[in-house]
């Protein structure tokens, strides 16, 4: 059977950065440690005035195509996942193709293009679509370009303002991939929820505390469904577990929940029993409240054990490094977590080829998905080619006044014009409006 998966990735971060403990927290009258320790965030990425979901997507895709030596003829499918779309009809992928056609001789006229929406999980769904398309033999030897792009902005004053971010992840899906191979080991947890939504509005309506609970509930269902396909999971089975990361503190909760689930009825639970007891079993309780209280106590104790902390430090914490510096990229976020994990493996000289990842995606509204991936032989060269740290470090550091202006520039209800904070170079930029209300783009040399 031909292996199908992610051959290569590129990310494009919004070119501005907001220091959360240093600049944001003091303005909000909050303790900086709420950000660094509580939410687990140091900074958020923001788009400069000439950037948007199209420029970030096109720039990530362009870098990817250049690095892999591709031309438009090599691409049979372009899918964009976003929850920041500005058009209910024309998909972002057409704009992206239009941008790329400005710099390549060929065109994408024979590539199937689309746009996927299901909050943050749409990026993973687009990966699935590409995988299925290739597995079905409909790709005619061509690759799929999947791009997750978002400007995760919240209304000023909303609690979510602390977890903003902006960026794009472009992924090349091929046969015989270099980075990770996808598989049929996959499970879902999905329910009609109103935790986070944008009913034809730019900024989300969010029930923040509830959204955290819904994330965990759906993720747990997805893990159970995943295990019905892949068999019981064991914590030592996976080199890393990248989760959707709206902020690292969310993943701290998801990691603990997953660990409790995975060690049940294993030697790890037995070994920990002397220290913290065995896990409460629902059937041993007459009263649901008493059971839930006992679970909470067990989780608190589990979190403090050396066994759990070591596992977390090796398997979960490395997935959060980039997220801490960029905030939430919605559809791109779980794919940033995968890159972050592999980057950790690369920087620490680990031999990851053949190792497995368990990837936990989530989209509000709500659906979680868990799937297994296997790291491929070529992963090391792919990671070597990325320059993520340099890109993050080159961002312009916003003052509070800059931040207020930039937020207004990207607010669709306002008409604000400001000077860009950075100078574009070898990249696509927003270039004003066309006569039918379309956005126009050009390549800035
Ligand atoms: N030192 C250390 N920790 C501190 C602290 C301090 N001084 N002050 C606060 N904290 C901790 C809190 O204890 C809390 O941690 P726990 O949840 O582990 O207790 C954490 O920092 C956050 O503090 P608050 O809960 O007080 O923060 P908040 O009221 O500002 O709201 C939020 C947090 C609900 C996540 C809000 O930022 C929000 O609404 N975000 C947008 C929604 C979101 O991201 N939801 C996530 C799930 S939905 C999803 O994943 C989809 C998506 O991408 C949006």
Image (spheres, rainbow, N blue to C red):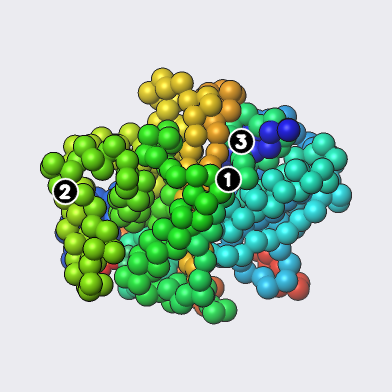
Q: Earlier in the sequence, mark 2 or mark 3?
A: 3
274 relative to 344, above or below: below
Among the 4 quarters of the image, the one containing residue 241: top left
- In the rendered structure, are the residues bearing label 1 and label 2 in contact, judged by CB atoms less than 8 Å apart? no
Q: Does the image show residue 244? A: yes
Q: Name the residue carrying label 2.
A: 277
Q: Nearer the viewer, mark 1 or mark 2?
A: 2
Looking at the picture, tell me which residue is in the foreground, 337 or 439. Answer: 337
Q: Disc 1 to disc 2, how far (Cα)?
A: 32 Å
Looking at the picture, tell me which residue is in the foreground, 13 or 323. Answer: 323
Q: Residues within 10 Å of mark 1 (few under 14, many from 20)?
A: some
53 relative to 306, above or below: below
Give the secondary structure at mark 3. strand
Residue 323, position in %: x, y?
39, 47
Q: Nearer the viewer, mark 2 or mark 3?
A: 2
* Residue shown at the point (40%, 67%) measured from the top left: 214
* Residue shown at the point (64%, 38%) measured from the top left: 5
Tell me, for residue 185, which label it has, or none: 1
Give the secondary structure at mark 1. strand
Q: Disc 1 to disc 3, how far (Cα)?
A: 11 Å
Give the secondary structure at mark 2. loop
Residue 77, position in %: x, y?
76, 49
Quarter of the C terminus within the rendering: top right
Looking at the picture, tell me which residue is in the foreground, 418 or 9. Answer: 9
Answer with left or right where residue 42 lies relative to residue 85. Answer: left
Q: Name the residue carrying label 3.
A: 181
Q: Disc 2 to disc 3, how far (Cα)?
A: 39 Å
Q: Quadrant of ligand 1?
A: bottom left
């Amino acid at each position: 059977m031909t292996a199908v998966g992610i051959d290569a990735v590129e990310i494009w971060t919004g070119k501005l950065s907001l220091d959360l403990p240093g600049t944001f927290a003091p303005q909000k009258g909050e303790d900086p440690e709420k950000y660094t320790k509580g939410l687990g965030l140091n900074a958020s990425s923001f788009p400069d005035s000439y950037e948007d979901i199209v420029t970030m997507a096109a720039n990530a895709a362009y870098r990817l195509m250049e690095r892999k030596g591709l031309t438009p003829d090599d691409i049979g499918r372009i899918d964009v996942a976003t929850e920041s779309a500005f058009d209910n009809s024309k998909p972002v992928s057409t704009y992206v193709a239009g941008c790329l056609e400005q710099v390549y001789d060929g065109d994408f006229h024979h590539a199937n293009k689309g746009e996927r929406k299901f909050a943050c999980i749409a990026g993973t769904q687009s990966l699935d679509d590409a995988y299925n398309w290739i597995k079905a033999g409909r790709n005619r030897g061509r690759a799929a370009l999947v791009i997750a792009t978002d400007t995760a902005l919240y209304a000023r004053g909303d609690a979510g303002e602390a977890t903003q971010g902006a960026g794009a992840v472009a992924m090349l899906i091929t046969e015989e991939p270099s980075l990770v191979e996808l598989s049929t080991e996959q499970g879902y947890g999905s329910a009609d929820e109103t935790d986070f939504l944008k009913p034809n509005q730019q900024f989300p309506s969010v029930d923040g505390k509830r959204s955290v609970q819904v994330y965990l509930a759906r993720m747990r269902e997805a893990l159970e469904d995943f295990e019905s396909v892949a068999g019981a999971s064991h914590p030592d089975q996976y080199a890393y577990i990248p989760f959707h990361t709206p902020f690292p503190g969310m993943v701290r909760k998801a990691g603990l929940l997953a660990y409790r689930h995975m060690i049940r009825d294993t030697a790890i639970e037995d070994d920990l029993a002397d220290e913290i007891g065995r896990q409460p079993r629902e059937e041993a309780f007459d009263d649901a409240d008493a059971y839930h209280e006992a679970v909470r106590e067990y989780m608190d104790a589990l979190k403090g054990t050396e066994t759990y902390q070591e596992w977390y430090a090796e398997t979960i914490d490395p997935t959060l490094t980039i997220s801490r510096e960029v905030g939430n990229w919605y559809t791109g976020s779980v794919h940033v977590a995968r890159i972050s994990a592999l980057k950790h493996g690369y920087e620490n000289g680990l031999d990851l080829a053949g190792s497995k990842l368990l990837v936990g995606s989530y989209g509000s509204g709500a659906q979680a998905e868990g799937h297994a991936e296997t790291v491929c032989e070529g992963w090391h060269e792919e990671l070597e080619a990325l320059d993520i740290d340099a890109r993050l470090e080159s961002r312009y550091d916003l003052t509070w006044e800059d931040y207020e202006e930039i937020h207004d520039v990207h607010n669709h209800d306002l008409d604000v014009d400001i000077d860009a904070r950075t100078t574009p170079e070898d990249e696509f930029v927003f270039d004003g409006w066309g006569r039918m209300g379309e956005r126009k783009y050009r390549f800035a040399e």
